[in-house]
Image (cartoon, rainbow, N blue to C red):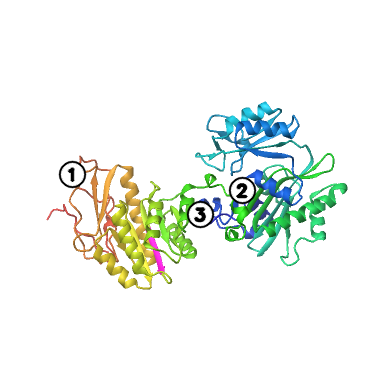
Amino acid sequence: MFKLARSRAAASALRSAKPQFAPSTRFPGLAQQQRRNLSIHEYLSADLLRQYGVGVPKGSNAKTAAEAEKIAKEIGTDDMVIKAQVLAGGRGKGTFDNGLKGGVRVIYSPTEAKMFAEQMIGHKLITKQTGAAGRLCNSVYICERKFARREFYLAILMDRASQGPVIVSSSQGGMDIEGVAKENPDAINTTYIDINTGVTDEIARNVATKLGFSEQCIEEAKDTIQKLYKIFVEKDATQIEINPLSETSDHQVLCMDAKFGFDDNAAYRQKEVFSWRDTSQEDPEEVRAAESGLNFIKLDGDIGCLVNGAGLAMATMDIIKLNGGQPANFLDVGGGATPAAIKEAFELITSDPKVTAIFVNIFGGIVRCDAIAHGLIATVKALNLKVPIIARLQGTNMEQAHQLINDSGMKIFSIDDLQSAAEKSVQLSKVVKMAREIDVGVEFSLGTFKTQRLFIFPGQQRTQPIHPTSAPLHHAPAPVVLDQDVHRPIGHPLVPLSQHLLRDPEGQEPEHPHAQR
């Protein structure tokens, strides 16, 4: 499963320091997802920091209100914080589905700990990052409240541009680092790390000094930075973000809040870390895809994509965008695509009600095109799909694949040229979307003569189909749609919305079935 290598806040801070390396914004939905990064809850991050001797406030996690009350008593202070354990930013300003405001609250007694835990656990917290669906809170983290004399921001990330680790730091911690990066980019410091030498005493001391730690805390801050880097390397982290990294009034250096991310590719050797994964915080469709060996990320568009290879998948989304469409997902079935995987992929794509067309783009290198065709045909039969499917199968056994599709009689538009296939996907998607908007039924058929045709009918009553043209299977004419300016009772003849949409690839207009002779 693909996840983001760093949090949005950390990425924003890094971009402000190096704007020339800003990532692509072609697919903002994809950019906002978490790729190649197992994220863990705050309480687990705190436990990991303690294991490495890094200073953190005293605290523990509770899964019930009774546990929360007990932990609050054990902390032994009347000044504490209770935090909803949800993998999303903006918890403090979030709202629970039961109306409770704020996923981070100051509490002054075990009784308050119990009261707020009852209102948080088992409810969804909605923040600026979760969207309207929110995220389920299964536990709360209760810790002592420490008052900082100074607050800083520090993150260790993998930077693709420099192909190594980088420390991003700022003296303006304890606040929204994205806002700092936007309004005052000079406040962000970037320190590149040589992977061979790591964070030396000199590097760590320079970072601590630049941040503004007092003389009494420089050495402890240096040690803390080096310990954080040790965690980063030994645990195969992609991100360690501390905000704030604080100096207290009694000159302690404490990590008040921590966000960790770990490389999914290291799961085989970081078994303990990956046992902390909380799938309740992830998109259920992405979890399902990962269990089937598929790389799937849901986007906001309406053209489903089924592709083998991440590079081709990105290119497919690009060409859909270039033709005026919007991809509904990133889906890489990989090099070992099987009929079962194809079926699972289609079920994932069609579970999104917004999908109006599906573009299958396969290059048969390791995988054989005929095997994909078998899976495709079986899936269309099994799922009784109602949206148009555009298939571009190139490479090993492509001729057999084309023949299988032709002979199947299934509603699969087979097109060899990438541009033509993308263009057709966008055209058909627009037709289906328009038909849905005006509550008109749409049926796609290859027809008796193996030509691609579109039947459009109001409600459930079908009109006469468009006459077949001489266009070959691999060059389908554009579909016909209803004229929205003309109102007709069900069953009355259709007219084209735009005559140029009816032209076939040779530029000829097919004969209208109700034209006067």
Q: Secondary structure at mark 1?
A: loop
Q: CA distance from mark 1 to mark 2?
A: 59 Å
Give the residue at x 59% y 53%: 274
The x, y position of residue 166, in whole percent, is 70, 59
- Given the image, on which type of amino acid does mark 3 rest? Phe
Q: Which residue is mark 3?
A: 27
Q: Viewer-proximal residue, 309 or 143?
A: 143
Q: Secondary structure at mark 2?
A: loop
Q: Main SS of the magenta segment?
A: strand
Direction from residue 259 to residue 353 in the image, left or right: left
- Given the image, on which type of amino acid does mark 2 rest? Ile
Q: Secondary structure at mark 3?
A: loop
Direction from residue 267 to residue 333 in the image, left or right: left
Could you tell me if the residues under marks 3 and 2 are in contact, i.e. CB atoms within 8 Å?
no
**In the drawing, what numbered circle is on residue 206?**
none
At label 1, counting other C-alpha atoms closer than 10 Å, the crowd grade (few under 14, some 14-19, many 20 or more) is some
- Residue 361 counted in the magenta span: yes
User: Which portion, as a residue range, is magenta?
Assistant: 359-363
The x, y position of residue 32, in whole percent, is 55, 50
The x, y position of residue 337, in whole percent, is 41, 64
Give the residue at x 80% y 53%: 223
The image quadrant that residue 172 belongs to is: top right
Q: Earlier in the sequence, mark 3 or mark 2?
A: 3
Q: Viewer-proximal residue, 30 or 1?
A: 1
Q: Which residue is mark 2?
A: 40
Q: Residue furthest left?
A: 517
Nearest to viewer (mark 1 / mark 2)? 2
Give the residue at x 67% y 63%: 164
Direction from residue 403 to residue 425 in the image, left or right: right
Which quadrant of the rendered structure holds the C terminus?
Answer: bottom left
**In the drawing, what numbered circle is on residue 492?**
1
Is residue 441 visible to us here? yes
